Amino acid sequence: MYDFKVRSNIHDYTVSFITDTLETLDRELGEGDYILVDRNILELYSPGLETTLSKQKFIIIDANETQKSYAGIIPIIENLILNGFRKNHRLIAIGGGITQDITSFISSVLYRGVDWIFFPTTLLAQCDSCIGSKTSINFGAFKNQIGGFYPPLKIFINTAFLTTLPPEQIMSGLGEMCHYFPIAGEADFIRYAREYQLAIQDPTVMEGLICRSLEIKKGYIEIDEYDRKERQIFNYGHSFGHALESLTDYRIPHGIAVSYGLDMANYVSVKMGLLEESIRIDMRAVLKNIWKGTSISDVSIDRFLTALTKDKKNVGTELRLILSEGYGKIVKKSVKLDQKFSDIIQQYFREELSK
C-alpha cells in the first residue's frame, strides 16, 4: 500500500512496508551476502533470527559510537575481505541508525561500492534516516565527520520492531518525525497533531505517519540529494537540538532534542518578527508532550551559544539557522551571534522552560 521508489543520482532504490521480516530476509538473501545485525536485535528476536543466521554469514554490530568510527569499522572490513566477501555480494543491515551508518559507509568504500539492503528497526531510522543517502562515521572524538552519499538498494520497513523499543525511543522518533510535517504545510501538521499520540498504540496509524514523513523527505532529496540548497530546511530544529545533545552528553535522545530545538527555532522566529505567536503556541502544545519527562534546565547558556557556533552549516562568524515564517514556509536565515540573539536565547531558557 505504501511502497514507493526514491530517485537517486547514484542508483534508484525502493521502500517497502512488510509484515514478515524473516520471510522477506530469506527471500532476499543470496549466496555470498553478509548480514550486519545489531546485537540487541539478535537478542530480542532469537531464536527465529538465529535460524536464518545459521545459514548465512553474519557480523554482530555493537550499536555504539565507538563501533561507528573509523577505527571501529576496520575489524568489520577485515572480516569481510578475509572471509570471501566479493564485489558482487551484498551487505544486509538489520538495526537502527548506527547499524545503518556502519553498513552504508562500508558499502560505499569497499571495492569502490557494493550493494546493500536495509531493515530499519527503530522509529528514527524508519521515519527519517533510511532514505536520503547520507553516510557518516566518527573520527576519534569528532562525530559524523567522515562520510558521503550512498543509498541502499532496497529498504524493508516492519513496524512490528517498534513494539520492543523503550518509550523514550518512540518519543525520540516522533520528535524527529514532527519536523517534517510543518515543513509540508498546515494540513500536514494538523494531521500529525491529531495522530501522533494515537500512533503509539495503533500500528496502522504509525505506519501512515511514517510513510507520510518519508514522502515529504523524498520530495526534497530527489531535487537536492547532496544537501546543497532545498534539502537544508530539514535542519529545522536541528542546530539547537544538536547543541542540546552534545551539552547533555546525549542524555537527551536525538528526536527529543530536536523537539526542544523546534520550539527554540519557533521562539527565535517570533522574536525576529518572522512567525505568528499563535503558530508557535500550537506547535508547542505538541512538542511539550514529546519532551515530557526530560529537562534541559541544567544546560549552561554560555556553553549552548558556543555549541551553536560549531554547527557545520555555519559560514564564517554567522549562524545559518533554519527558521519559520509559518506552515510550509521554513526558511534559511543568516543570524549574527550578537547581544540581541544572546538575549533571545537567555530569555527562552529563563522563561519558557518553566511553562
Image (cartoon, grey):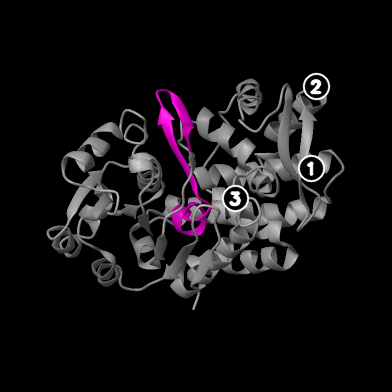
Residue hosting label 1? 269
Tag 2, which secondary structure? helix
Tell me the residue at 38%/46% (across/down). 113
Q: Are marks 1 and 3 in contact (CB under 8 Å)?
A: no
Q: Quadrant of residue 167?
A: bottom left
What x and y, as percent, mark residue 286?
63, 57
Position of 297 relative to 214 (above/below): above
Amino acid bearing label 3: Glu
Q: Residue at 46% across / 32% down in the picture?
A: 146
Estimate the spatial distance between the alpha carbons at disc 2 and disc 1, rounded to whole Å: 16 Å
Q: Earlier in the sequence, mark 1 or mark 3?
A: 3
Which of the two marks, 1 or 3, is nearer to us in this view?
Answer: 3
* Residue 160 percent location from the top left of the image: 36, 67
Q: Which residue is mark 3?
A: 225
Q: CA distance from mark 3 to mark 2?
A: 36 Å
Q: Is residue 269 left or right of residue 69?
A: right
Residue 129 vs 238, above or below: the answer is below
Asked if the residue under mark 1 is in contact with the one under mark 2, i.e. CB atoms within 8 Å, the reply is: no
Residue 339 has which mark?
Answer: 2
For this orientation, the residue located farthest to the right is 273
Residue 274 in magenta? no
Residue sitting at x 61%, y 41%: 238
Q: Which residues are magenta?
A: 124-147
Amino acid type, residue under disc 2 in the picture? Gln
Q: Earlier in the sequence, mark 3 or mark 2?
A: 3
**Between residues 167 and 178, which one lies in front from this camera angle?**
178
Please identify the quarter of the rendering in which residue 140 is found.
top left
Q: Neighbour class for label 2 at 10 Å: few (<14), some, many (≥20)?
A: few
Q: Quadrant of the C terminus?
A: top right
Observer able to see residue 41:
yes
Distance, label 1 to label 3, CA atoms, is 27 Å
Label 1 element class:
helix
